[in-house]
């Protein structure tokens, strides 16, 4: 057999064999065998120098043709292998796309990050403190000495007589003030809190709270209203208004409940029980005793503080009617939000 | 607290609609959580008068009553035992809608005329329950004698009942009179004072001894004789009922009535059970006492006891004793009105788990000045209700009358705290309307709160009074002024967020679990080998325990995250084809009796399909390489330069994660035994990592490195080697022999099986050669590849397929 004939034989053998190739791996073996650096085609080409010039020209042409044909066969086969075996050549564009794999943040985290984004935009710094707290920080330094009747406002889980699971993020107020005094301060304190509380649709024994604290000269209840209004409008919509109502917390004086206009914008609906307002937070001016416990002089420096539940924010935004969904971690719940 | 508006009207004029009143109170801090309109359903119910009662033949318990209702009279058959001629009653005519008193669940029904024992009954005389006024159904509701016959019942008895949720500090407003005071300040209407006659009856004054003011700031006792115990008048019963208090008898009802009206708890002792003088003392060690509710209770140390010459007769401020209870036969009582020490009451009530209406009020602090006023009111009512005859003036122990301290309120303080200018005259006016004594001085007010406002001690308290009575609507919304604080960046929080967002992008879903778990939930992890890294299991004495857990399921602070995440994984696998979860949060490490450490960890658990199933792709079950890829990618993304994922020689299918030479955790295919004990029937891969180590090793910014602009030469090398040679060993050789132009490599295929001999595998690597300053030739690539091939033969005894093979 002349060299050109050998080359044609290699070509036809290769083209015949490629039809039986059923996997990408087999195709690679096929490629190495015929088209590889030490493959059959390369072997034949290596003999070019040993033949007459006429035969060499013919063999050269045959080799080029064979190489092109085999490469084309290779890419065609590769493409074919990559299309599902079930499919014919016609592409059914109504088949579903290939869904990318997507994860998601927990709804609480997502909401918390949104809250943090808004407050950091107003110059607040995130400050995290411990979840297991001393009785002194959780209560005592917040103007709630032992035997204070208002301690009943927090059903508490105790680790020992002096150690509790924090019932609110407020102990972080003292920790932040003690760390940064006498500088002016704007912090938000996010984190888990715990209550000894029977669980139902609107009460959880564990929840996330975000506390805001601003301390410095010239901080007033009007500043709290301004900051909270800016928050509410970014969080719930630019048409929201903020209302203060009188209230009582031992660590603020004056104390207020903070309401925002409901999703119904005041018309009254089931969510707001017809009042047009939603209670989202409680706060006020930091009590002089607490300011002093933080290391500032309450006659010169004033501060506001507020606290709110992250889950409640999420429930209002997304129309969730049962807080127990949050920490069941059921993906049928979590996937709806992220 | 439930308060009928009709009762409030006795103490203050109310012009505004009830909803408006509720709104005003709510804004001022007295939150009204409900308004009940009691007369709203009483169509076709009228005030009737019982004219005549006749027996129904052959029915002992039924009577035929003729009831006049102004327009007409009609006859009704009733079994009510308390019906009597001359009574005013609630008469329902045909068509009235009433509560079905015999239904198990609340339900209404429309009244129809019926025949009972052959006698036509044209209407009904109603019980309190049938009118929706409480649970009473023993007999019919008897109306006050003043009610106008023929008037709609709603006009005689209809009322609005406000439900309050009062904050702790507003104890002073927790009564009809207290609320009237607040309403007066809010609306500017002057409240009506009731003049209660001073107590000064003839006869000997009762005497008593009080062990000291550490027990009670004030103690009053009044003797009342000649009592007749019977049900109290309808108006008292109805008010108590509307306020949510059950009517019992005239003496008990009057003490409750006076308490609701003035806020002062009162207690009556049957005087005939008492020997000698009453003494107020602290409990003895080991003292046991039987309270009104027939419970024999050990008395906590320091409990305030009321005693006579021989024995204890009551627990002061908490509950009376069974031995001195007012009963049907009582004819003489000692009526007590006292100001007990709030802290003692609180401690004892908590220690006994016995919280009563009285103890709740005493805990919050009572006004000693109120004690005689409420006592006088109760005596006045007992004279009316029980024909009582007071004997002598009350015994009144009051060693140190309270003196209210004056508080300075600089005008500027109001603006400094509220951020709004309030004219001094307005400040003065508001404080006066709250019955504070106000003296103005130059730039400030000198304010003395009344005795019932012991909650007010600071200038800030006065600012609150001004703020809430004015209404906070007046306060503008302004952004904080003054020096802008330094905004500090929190590296740790930023990095945590980056990690979470990277994991989400990698397809994982975040879970957040309770910090509290049970020992049982940790138990499956006990058998795991304890490596150097973060432990999943801790012996119970190393855990932080909550003393009063809600349930045994949530009793200990978690020492690791994976137990929670794996529970989530198991639950979700029931309905999800792919479950890839992570949690990044705190665990708790006990430090003796002090505060525990709260380091953070990162846990991941992956199971199910790698990708959502699709007709275009073969389904692939998640395996260890998915997890390894996530861990590897995350640590690289956080620019932890010092990490390594190393084979764990102790455990198959397990990787140790090392950071800066320290063990930071593991990434493993979980053992079948563990999965079985967790009730999971699919393969699971999971990791738990020490986040603090990652945080310490992560670098914030990376430095830009110029990349080569010249094309790369790519060559493949197929390696045939023993199965036992790990890929890592092959790659070490590639790195060592590849020369300076070797830019990288990628393992493209691993193959075992025919036609390869048993115990052998083939690895296909793609090599990439590149130079920073010129285009490499194919020959230079080949040279690099050959050097690698030589190294593989020499170092690992590997064959290179395509060149070594025949
Ligand atoms: Zn609404």
Image (cartoon, coloured by chain):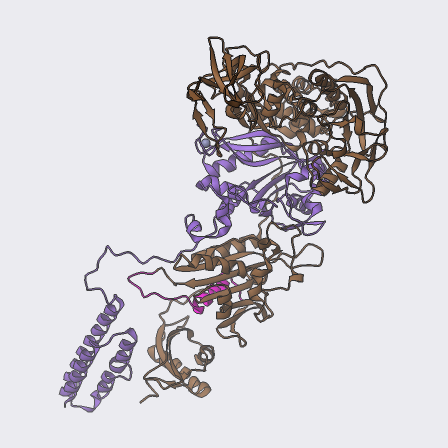
Q: Nearer the viewer, residue B790 or B75?
A: B75
Residue B2 % position (x, y): 59, 27
Q: Is residue B802 above or below residue B503?
A: below
Magenta span has B624?
yes
Taking the image as shown, residue B796 lies to the left or right of residue B641, namely: left
Q: Colour of chain A?
A: purple
Taking the image as shown, residue B694 lies to the left or right of residue B282, namely: left
Which residue appears farthest toward the top when viewing the image?
Answer: B71
Q: Is residue B769 above or below residue B396?
A: below
Q: Is residue A131 above or below residue A225?
A: below
Residue A122 % position (x, y): 54, 40
Q: Nearer the viewer, residue B708 or B187?
A: B187
**Highlighted range, magenta:** B613-641
Residue B626 % position (x, y): 43, 66
Taking the image as shown, residue B554 lies to the left or right of residue B222, namely: left
- The reply to whether residue A35 is visible in this rendering is yes
Magenta span has B763?
no
Taking the image as shown, residue B81 lies to the left or right of residue A143, namely: left
Provide the letter of the chain coloured brown. B
């Amino acid at each position: 057999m002349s060299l050109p004939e050998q080359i044609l034989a290699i070509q036809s053998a290769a083209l015949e064999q490629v039809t039986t190739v059923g996997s990408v791996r087999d195709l690679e073996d096929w490629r190495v065998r015929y088209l590889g650096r030490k493959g059959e085609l390369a072997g034949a080409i290596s003999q070019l120098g040993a033949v007459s010039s006429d035969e060499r020209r013919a063999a050269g042409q045959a080799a080029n043709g064979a190489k092109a044909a085999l490469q084309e066969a290779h890419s065609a086969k590769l493409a074919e292998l990559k299309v599902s075996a079930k499919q014919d050549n016609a592409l059914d564009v109504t088949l579903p796309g290939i869904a990318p794999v997507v994860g998601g943040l927990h709804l609480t985290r997502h909401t918390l990050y949104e809250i943090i984004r808004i407050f950091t935009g107003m110059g607040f710094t995130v400050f995290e403190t411990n979840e297991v707290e001393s009785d002194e920080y959780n209560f005592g330094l917040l103007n709630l000495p032992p035997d204070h009747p208002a301690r009943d406002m927090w059903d508490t889980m105790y680790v020992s007589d002096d150690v509790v699971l924090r019932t609110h993020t407020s102990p972080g107020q003292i920790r932040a003030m003690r760390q940064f005094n006498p500088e002016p301060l704007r912090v938000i304190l996010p984190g888990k809190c715990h209550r000894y509380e029977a669980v139902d649709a609107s009460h959880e024994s564990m929840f996330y709270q975000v506390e805001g604290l601003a301390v410095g000269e010239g901080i007033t209840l009007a500043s709290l209203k301004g900051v909270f209004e800016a928050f509410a409008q970014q969080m719930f919509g630019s048409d929201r208004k903020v209302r203060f109502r009188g209230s009582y917390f031992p660590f603020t004086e004056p104390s207020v409940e903070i309401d925002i206009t409901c999703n119904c914008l005041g018309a009254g609906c089931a969510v707001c029980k017809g009042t047009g307002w939603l209670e989202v937070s409680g706060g006020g001016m930091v009590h002089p005793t607490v300011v002093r416990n933080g290391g500032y002089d309450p006659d010169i420096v004033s501060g506001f503080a507020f606290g709110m539940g992250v889950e409640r924010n999420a429930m209002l935004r997304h129309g969730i009617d049962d807080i127990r969904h949050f920490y069941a971690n059921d993906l049928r719940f979590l996937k709806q939000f992220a | 607290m439930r308060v009928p508006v009709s009762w409030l009207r006795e103490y203050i004029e109310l012009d505004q609609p009830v909803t408006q009143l509720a709104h005003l109170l709510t804004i001022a801090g007295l939150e009204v959580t409900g308004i009940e309109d009691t007369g709203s359903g009483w169509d076709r119910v009228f005030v009737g008068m019982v004219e005549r009662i006749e027996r129904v033949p052959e029915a002992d318990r039924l009577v035929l009553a003729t009831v006049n209702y102004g327009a007409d009279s009609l006859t009704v058959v009733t079994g009510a035992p308390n019906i009597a001629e001359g009574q005013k009653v609630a008469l329902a005519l045909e068509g009235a809608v009433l509560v079905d008193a015999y239904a198990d669940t609340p339900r209404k029904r429309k009244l129809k005329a019926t025949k009972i024992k052959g006698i036509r009954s044209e209407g009904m005389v109603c019980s309190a329950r049938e009118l929706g006024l409480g649970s009473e159904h023993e007999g019919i509701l008897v109306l006050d004698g003043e009610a106008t016959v023929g008037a709609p019942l709603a006009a005689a008895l209809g009322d609005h009942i406000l439900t309050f949720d009062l904050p702790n500090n507003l104890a002073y407003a927790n009564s009809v009179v207290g609320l009237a005071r607040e309403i007066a300040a809010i609306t500017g209407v002057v409240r009506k004072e009731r003049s209660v006659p001073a107590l000064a009856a003839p006869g000997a004054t009762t005497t008593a001894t009080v062990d000291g003011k550490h027990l009670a700031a004030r103690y009053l006792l009044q003797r009342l004789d000649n009592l007749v115990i019977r049900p109290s008048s309808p108006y008292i019963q109805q008010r108590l009922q509307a306020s949510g208090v059950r009517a019992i008898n005239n003496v008990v009802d009057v003490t409750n009535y006076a308490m609701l009206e003035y806020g002062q708890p009162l207690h009556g002792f049957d005087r005939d059970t008492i020997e000698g003088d009453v003494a107020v003392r602290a409990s003895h060690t080991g003292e046991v006492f039987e309270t009104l509710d027939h419970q024999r209770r050990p008395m906590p140390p320091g409990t305030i006891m009321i005693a006579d010459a021989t024995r204890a007769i009551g627990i002061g401020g908490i509950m009376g004793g069974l031995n001195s209870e007012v009963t049907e036969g009582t004819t003489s009582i000692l009526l007590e009105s006292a100001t007990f020490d709030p802290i003692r009451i609180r401690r004892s009530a908590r220690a006994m788990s016995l919280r009563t209406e009285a103890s709740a009020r005493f805990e919050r602090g009572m006004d000693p000045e109120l004690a005689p006023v409420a006592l006088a009111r109760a005596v006045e009512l007992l004279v009316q209700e029980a024909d009582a005859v007071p004997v002598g003036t009350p015994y009144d122990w009051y060693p140190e009358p309270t003196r209210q301290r004056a508080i300075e309120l600089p005008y500027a303080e109001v603006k400094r705290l509220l951020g709004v200018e309030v004219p001094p005259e307005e400040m003065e006016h508001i404080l006066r309307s709250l019955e504070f004594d106000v003296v103005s001085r130059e730039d400030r007010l000198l304010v003395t709160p009344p005795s019932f406002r012991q909650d007010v001690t600071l200038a800030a308290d006065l600012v609150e009074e001004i703020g809430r009575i004015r209404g906070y609507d007046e306060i503008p919304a302004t952004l904080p002024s003054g020096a802008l604080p330094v905004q500090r960046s929190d590296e740790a929080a930023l990095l945590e967020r980056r990690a979470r967002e990277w994991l989400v992008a990698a397809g994982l879903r975040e879970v957040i679990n309770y910090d509290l778990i049970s020992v049982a939930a940790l138990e499956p992890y006990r058998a795991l080998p304890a490596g150097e890294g973060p432990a999943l299991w801790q012996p119970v004495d190393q855990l932080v325990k909550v003393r009063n857990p809600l349930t045994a399921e949530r009793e200990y602070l978690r020492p690791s995250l994976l137990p929670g995440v794996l529970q989530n994984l198991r639950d979700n696998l029931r309905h999800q084809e792919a479950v890839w979860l992570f949690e990044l949060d705190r665990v708790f490490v006990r430090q003796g009796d002090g505060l525990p450490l709260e380091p953070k960890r990162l846990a991941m658990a992956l199971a199910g399909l790698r990708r959502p199933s699709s007709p275009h792709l073969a389904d692939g079950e998640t395996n260890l390489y998915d997890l390894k890829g996530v861990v590897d990618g995350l640590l690289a993304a956080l620019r932890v330069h010092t990490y390594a994922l190393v084979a764990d020689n102790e455990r198959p299918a397990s990787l140790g994660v090392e950071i800066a030479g320290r063990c930071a955790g593991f990434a493993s295919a979980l053992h079948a035994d563990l999965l079985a004990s967790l009730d999971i029937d699919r393969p699971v891969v999971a990791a738990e990592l020490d986040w603090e180590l990652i945080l310490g090793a992560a670098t914030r910014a990376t430095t830009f490195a110029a990349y080569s602009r010249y094309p790369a030469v790519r060559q493949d090398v197929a390696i045939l080697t023993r199965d036992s040679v790990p890929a890592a060993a092959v790659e070490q050789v590639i790195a060592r022999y590849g020369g300076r132009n070797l830019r990288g490599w990628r393992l493209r295929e691993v193959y075992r099986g025919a036609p390869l001999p048993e115990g052998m595998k083939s690895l296909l690597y793609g090599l990439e050669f590149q130079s920073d300053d010129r285009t490499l030739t194919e020959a230079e690539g080949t040279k690099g590849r050959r050097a690698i091939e030589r190294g593989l033969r020499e170092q690992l005894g590997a064959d290179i397929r395509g060149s070594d093979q025949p």
